[in-house]
Amino acid sequence: MIGTIPIVGVSAAENEVEYKYFLNVNDVTYLQMHIAGNKNTDGSAFIDETNKQLFDCVDMNKDGKLSVADVTALQIQISQNN
């Protein structure tokens, strides 16, 4: 995602890379464009919905799909934490 700043760490328990995402207002726009069906210049989706950790970050209401409700919840989350 455009505004996402990934922080990479290694999980000692599973010995695999973990990604944590900090989302900002650029990500709201990116999520809206993804929901609208826009694609990257290479034709790929804006958000890789198969990336569970990333998907879980933007599926704000945890209903298993990305929708306008997630955009609204993300906007509220960002505004309350800035």
Image (cartoon, rainbow, N blue to C red):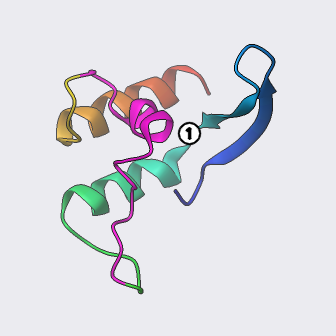
Secondary element at tag 1: loop
Q: In this view, does 63 lie to the left or right of 20?
A: left
Indicate whether 31 appears above or below 33: above
Q: Which residue lies furthest to the bottom in this view?
A: 41
Asked if residue 23 is among those painted magenta in the image, a careful observer would answer no
User: Mostly what secondary structure, the magenta segment?
Assistant: loop
Task: Name the residue: 55% across, 60% down.
Answer: 2
Amino acid on which the number 1 mark rests in the picture? Leu
- Residue 65, horizontal then vertical, whole percent: 20, 37
Q: Residue, x 35% and y 52% (percent of image)?
A: 31
Q: Which residue is drawn at 70% across and 20% down?
A: 14
Left or right of 10, for residue 70: left
Query: Which region of the structure is painted magenta?
Result: 43-62
Residue 43 vertical position relative to residue 20 in the rendered view, above or below: below
User: Is the residue 1 above or below the residue 11 in the image?
Assistant: below
* Residue at the farthest front position: 14
Q: Position of residue 42 (x, y in %)?
A: 41, 85
Horizontal side of residue 57 vs 11, given as left or right:
left
Tell me how many marks there are: 1
Q: Is residue 71 above or below residue 63?
A: below
Q: In which quarter of the image is the C terminus?
A: top right
For disc 1, the marked residue is: 23
Measured from the top left, where is residue 75 in percent x and y? 39, 34
* Mark 1 burial class by Cα count in 10 Å: few <14, some 14-19, many 20+: many
In the displayed structure image, the side of residue 19 where residue 26 appears, left or right: left
Tell me where residue 9 sits by quadrant. top right
Q: Answer whether residue 60 is magenta in the image.
A: yes
Residue 23 placement (x, y as % from top left): 56, 39
Of 51 and 20, the residue lying toward us: 51
